[in-house]
Amino acid sequence: MNIAIVGGTGKEGAGLGGRWAVAGHSIIIGSRDEERAKTKATELRERAQKLAIIGHTNLDAARLGEVVVLALPAIGLDATLRPLEEACRGKVVISTVVPLTFGGPRLFTPPPAGSSAEEAQALLPGAKVVAAFHHIAAHELSETDHPIECDLLTCGGDADAKAVVADLGKSMGLRAIDVGALSNAGLLEGITAVLATINRRYKLKNSGIKITGL
Amino acid sequence: MNIAIVGGTGKEGAGLGGRWAVAGHSIIIGSRDEERAKTKATELRERAQKLAIIGHTNLDAARLGEVVVLALPAIGLDATLRPLEEACRGKVVISTVVPLTFGGPRLFTPPPAGSSAEEAQALLPGAKVVAAFHHIAAHELSETDHPIECDLLTCGGDADAKAVVADLGKSMGLRAIDVGALSNAGLLEGITAVLATINRRYKLKNSGIKITGL
């Protein structure tokens, strides 16, 4: 499957792209800066043989992707996403965006929409937004020599879109768990704030979450 | 240790009380209705021999407890807690309160304070409030014949109070993980909304959470 990763030069996006490329998907790394996208794609290709990873602008990446992954900062989402509305229409869009503010009174600072995923859905009304992958540590993703010890929690309004995301999770060895409607996205984004706090407090890079009893 | 459980006739409070009693603590079940508290205490005592569990009004329970556990609904917290302010002064107060609204547009509906634990801290300014135990399924707690497969996430402003809560967790076999300041309490309360969604969707009663990589 062709997977576009908007903002894919960052750690989380590049980590997801690397894992999916190893699993046999074709990856289009998107960036505001096309050169940076091409450089990151080259870097990821060099890690392993025959990986299908290319770099483009965010807009071209979104056009080329059958699935579009948002691996962007929460701030400035509107400026980045508005130009992609047409390119994302009808597609599964995976939001990995997490609204964290370090050093403020509160670590988790969701936008007025309630979550970054809901903000993305409002900006991309024709897309099927699924919130997922936020809480899979970039550090875990980038070390492709071992399995990721973590579950994949997803939420969104479209069951078929969630099934696609679940398959993408399975292709990197993750068990997908359906956490209901997109109105629950703030809860999943908040879990990343929990893990970021644990990482800092226990000097880790890769804490994750598993659901027990399932 | 003497542990008061305000609102202890509910499933979560009674489950915690039963586990702690088995671990050797003395439990005071509190209720608005003293008779209900005494009935629940008798019921819990009958499950096992020699368990130290008594019933009282919420106020008397809070006075008797060295640690006070809030096992209350999120709605009406102010009316229940204001009369307990003096009784809780200087004590470790554990908030298990979760602001969920079923059937509305959003499952997780925190109060203006950001979380029920922060609301409790504002109502009990002399207490050391720690948010914990929300996400340990009542169903898991009540079945004392097997260990609880779940981690205990805690947050709060007082490190010593969190250490007390961690010990209380250990006494029922839980690994305690420190998730920072009380401003993170909304995140922990939100995890219960995630688990409630998973329970409903997968027809479970006892989903839980484990932190990996730690």
Image (spheres, coloured by chain):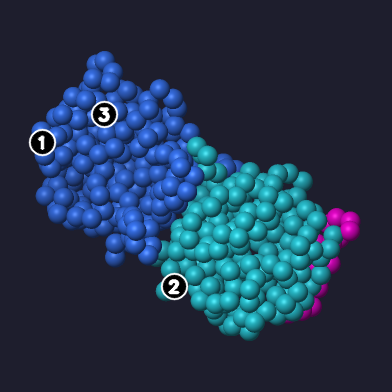
Chain colours: A blue, B cyan
Q: Residue furthest front?
A: B160
State the separation of the CA atoms marked 3 and 2: 45 Å
- B5 up-or-down from A135: above or below: below
Label for residue B113?
Answer: 2
Label for residue A34?
Answer: 1
Sequence-wise, which precedes: disc 3 or disc 1?
A: 3
The magenta stretch spans which residues? B33-50
Count of marks placed on residues:
3
Instruction: Answer yes or no: is residue A66 visible.
Output: no
Q: Chain of mark 1?
A: A
Q: Quadrant of residue B158?
A: bottom right
Q: Which residue is mark 3?
A: A1
Label for residue A101?
Answer: none
Element type at mark 1 = helix
Element type at mark 3 = loop
Amino acid type at mark 1 = Glu
Which residue does the image show at 55% across and 47% down from the upper left?
A: B209
